Amino acid sequence: MIDYLTDKTYKAGAYLRLSIEDENKDIESISIKNQRAFIKEFALKNNIEIYDYYVDDGYSGGNFDRPAWKRLINDIENGVIDCVITKDMSRLGREFIETGNYIFKYFPEHNIRYIAILEDYDTLNPNGSEDMLPFKAVINDMYLKDISKKIKSVRHDMMAKGEFVSGTVPYGYKRSEENNKILVIDEYAAPIVQRIFEMKDSGKTDGMIARVLTDEGILPPDVYRGKKLKYTTITTNLWKPCTIQHILKNEAYIGTLIQGKYERVSLKSKKKRLLPKNKWVIRKGVLPKIISNELFERVNAPKRKTNIRYRQYDYLLKGLVVCADCGVTMSVRRVKNQTDSTKITPIYVCRTYARYRNNVCTMHYYREEDLNELVLKEIRTVLLKYSKNETLEKKYETALCDFNVLKEYENTLKIYKSKIVTIDKAISELYKDRANNIISTDEFFGIKSDLEKDRKDYESKITDLEIIVSESKNLLTDQKTKMKYINNFLKAKNPDKEMLKTLINRIEINEDKTIKIFFNFNLNEENNER
């Protein structure tokens, strides 16, 4: 056991951790209470001041995504503590690579003294115990993998018995008060599920069903369950078509429990992947039915394919038009003429209103043809008025760079110059390796020759590019050239979208149909409104 005094009084962070993976061990010996007392006694005996206890109770040692650990690291970065103490290394972590990174790289780089009491390990006083530490880290890693396999096996057996071990309970069910692995009917939500299937069966679309439920003030599943959301938006309390679609396809409502569809890509990653269907755990008839098999089959019957082809229209101002109230980009709806059904009129409409109706935003719309005419007329008016304005000319100079190869050339030039810097560093390191007899003379001259050849190639490319960039800049600063591009827009009968994007930032439409055009350049510190 470590037993010594140092002249310096260290300010230490005592890190304590306990997780479910320790269930099969003697809980009393590794409990948070025991760890705290053990470290406190050690600190008093060895002239170490405990700044704070950082406790992660119920967190796995398989990763370092733990709140108390993050707080400890933050205190290290801020210079609050200069020592970390754990009862043993497994309390720090059981994952071999990342645990080793903290012990052998992060702590030394930040001048942190690390003590694992039971391993008799202290970075301040090496005694040979550090030689065994990597092996202990590997053993901890193997232990974690073994525990993970056992937990996975137990979960799989529970799934096979028809017990519910997943995280989120399907909407319409709730956990039984007698056994939380058994699902029973939720008397409030189940009738709503039935209504969803009946509305779909009657011909309503997913969007229509979502609007009906929202208008009636029915909370969507996540909000109803009281799920803690990472963030909320204006649509948090609204039903969405994707939620309706998920419910309609869930076989739980006909009594079939499907689990084990996903697995983590590795023990050390939270990312999951979908398994092939033959590996899913499917148990029929283990849940109380909410709807009949016949209704489920009708709703999910394959839709008949039609020969109708839907054309994608790329409207001139699409992507630039936004709702002035909710800020969402407006979409274009093709509406039939009431008097002549053969005529189609494209209209910009608020996407939020179209999806959720009166719950979030109000009706904002404008005929696409009329909006194009108004915007193009306004742009020409502005350019004629400010065609000699220096700010506008600078804006067009920038726009020319964006659509000219100049920008690409300048980026390539930066890359080539950084390559030369890298090569120079490599040559410098090469000399050091040769001086330390890491490489032979033949290897030295061979590698050096290749690097110098690459350097000459990049220098030649840089010379050519610098000439091109210089000539391009001369062209851009030419007054006649700049005015030529400005006049090209003024003369263009049908300017394209790219040309408009260089001029317009966005077009806002108010409910009263007033239009506000925001240009990409400043016009006497004012925006134009029409």
Image (tube, rainbow, N blue to C red):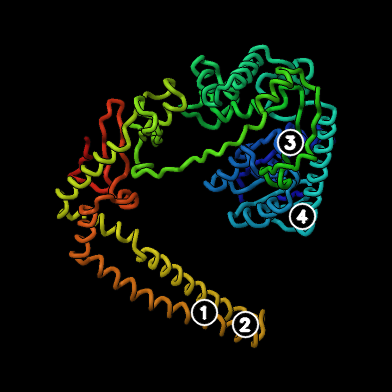
Q: Is residue 278 visible?
A: yes
Element assignment for label 2: helix
Task: Tell me the quarter of the picture where residue 209 sits.
Answer: top right
Instruction: Say which of marks 3 and 1 sits in front.
Output: 1
In this rendering, would 407 be left or right of 191? left
Name the residue that disc number 2 marks. Answer: 434
Foreground residue, 530 or 5? Answer: 530
Q: Is residue 61 visible?
A: no
Element assignment for label 4: helix
* Image quadrant containing the C terminus: top left
Give the spatial CA distance, label 4 vs label 2: 34 Å
Element assignment for label 1: helix
Name the residue that disc number 4 marks. Answer: 133
Mark 1 residue crowding within 10 angstroms, few (<14) / some (14–19) / many (20+) = some
Foreground residue, 504 or 273? Answer: 504
Mark 2 residue crowding within 10 angstroms, few (<14) / some (14–19) / many (20+) = some
Instruction: Say which of marks 4 and 2 sits in front.
Output: 2
Give the spatial CA distance, label 3 vs label 1: 55 Å
